[in-house]
Image: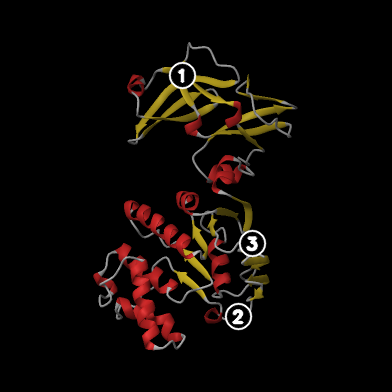
Amino acid sequence: MSHVRLDALSKVYGSNAPAVDDLTLTVERGEFLALLGPSGCGKTTTLRMIAGLVPPTGGTITVGGADVTSLPPYRRNMGLVFQNYALFPHMSVADNIAFGLEMRNLPRSEQTSRIAEALAMVRLEGYEKRRPRELSGGQQQRVALARALVIRPDVLLLDECLSNLDAKLREQMRIEIREIQRRLGITAIFVTHDQVEALTMCDRVALMDRGRLAQVGTPEDVYERPANRFVANFVGRINVMRGEANGASLAVAGAPVAVANAPRTQGTVDVMVRPHRMTIRPEDVAAAAGENRVSGTIGRIVYIGDVIQVAVDTPAGPLVAERTTTGPDWHTLAVGQRVAVAWSAADTLVFPPEAR
C-alpha cells in the first residue's frame, strides 16, 4: 500500500482556473518525491493541501491508509520546512526545535533527549542557546529541518527550502538532506522549481503543468524519455528545430533526419536535441552512419569552466552544442568558423509543435 495517496485532488480559488486539477498521485513509504514545475503550476498548493494548511476543493488525501483530508495540520503528524524557515526570532535554537514537542505535551526529559538527537542529526551540537539572527542561512535551514524531524513525523514536507541559499551551500544541503532522509527512511515530498534539485535528490519526480501532472517517473525517465514537449523543454537544456514529418520520414530544413522512433504525426513537428548530445565536427568530414548533421557558422562561444557552449547559426535555426574542456581541441574553435553540428538518431526527440 502506498504511504501517501492523492485521489482526484483539486483546488479552485473563486472563479479562476483550477490551481490543482484532478491530481492523482502515490508516494511509497520511505520514498523521496519531488513536485517540480514552474511558478504557478500548483506544486506548493498541493503540498499545503497535504499539510492541511489549505482545504481542497475536491478529492482525498490518504496517509498510511487513513483519510486525513479533513484533519487539521496538528493531527496529521507531518513535519514541514518552509522556504523562509519560519523560525521564532526571540527563541533559542533549542526552544525553536522544542516547539512541536511542547505542543504535544511531551515530558521535559524526553524533549531534552530528542532535541540533542535532532541537533546531532543536523550537525549543530553546541548551538542550543543561539538565536536565529546569530546563525548563517545554512544553519537556520538546519534548525528548521531539525524542528520538522524532532517530532518524528510520518511524512516530511519541504517547500522550496533551499532557494534562499547560495549555490555552494545549496549543493551541500542537497547532499545532507538526502542523507538524513535515507538514514531515517522517512517519506518525503519536496517542492522545487529547480530541476537540478529534483534530479539529484529524489527517487521520483512529479512534474506539474498548470495544475496537472505532466509526467511522473525517475529522474532518468523524465530527462531521457520526456512524455511531451513541455517536459522535454522544462527539464534540462534543449535545442528546438522545426521539422516536417511524413509517415516514417522526417526532415529539418529540407534535409532528412534519422530518428529512433518514427513520429506518429503528419506535418509540422518540433525536433528537440539536448546540447550535450550534439557534437561539433569539421564541415568537410563525412557524416558517420546513422548520424544527423547540419552545417552552420559559429556565432558565439561561452566558456563555463568544465564545458563550453558553442552556438551555431544553421538553416534549422540557432543550435547550441556543449563540449568538455578536458581536451585541447576546443581551443581550435572560433567565432565565424564553418562547422557541422552532429547528433544521433537515438538522441532525437519529436513532438507536436507548441503554438507560436
Q: Quadrant of residue 261?
A: top right
Q: Position of residue 213 (x, y in %)?
A: 63, 55
**First-in-chain label (2 vs 1):** 2
CB within 8 Å, label 3 to label 1: no
Q: Which residue is mark 3?
A: 26
- Report the front residue among 24 and 101: 101
**Mark on residue 32?**
none
**Mark on residue 71?**
2
Q: How many marks?
A: 3
Height in image: 303 above or below 94? above
Label 3 SS:
strand
Label 2 SS:
loop
**Mark on residue 281?**
1
Q: Position of residue 273 (x, y in %)?
A: 55, 33
Q: Residues within 10 Å of mark 3 (few under 14, many from 20)?
A: some
Question: Dividing the image into 4 quarters, which one contains the C terminus?
Answer: top right
Q: Is residue 59 left or right of residue 91?
A: right
Q: Residue at x 65, y 66 (%)?
A: 6
Q: Amino acid at mark 3?
A: Thr
The answer for how far apart the CA atoms under marks 3 and 2 are is 19 Å
**First-in-chain label (3 vs 2):** 3
Q: Residue at x 37, y 72 (%)?
A: 118
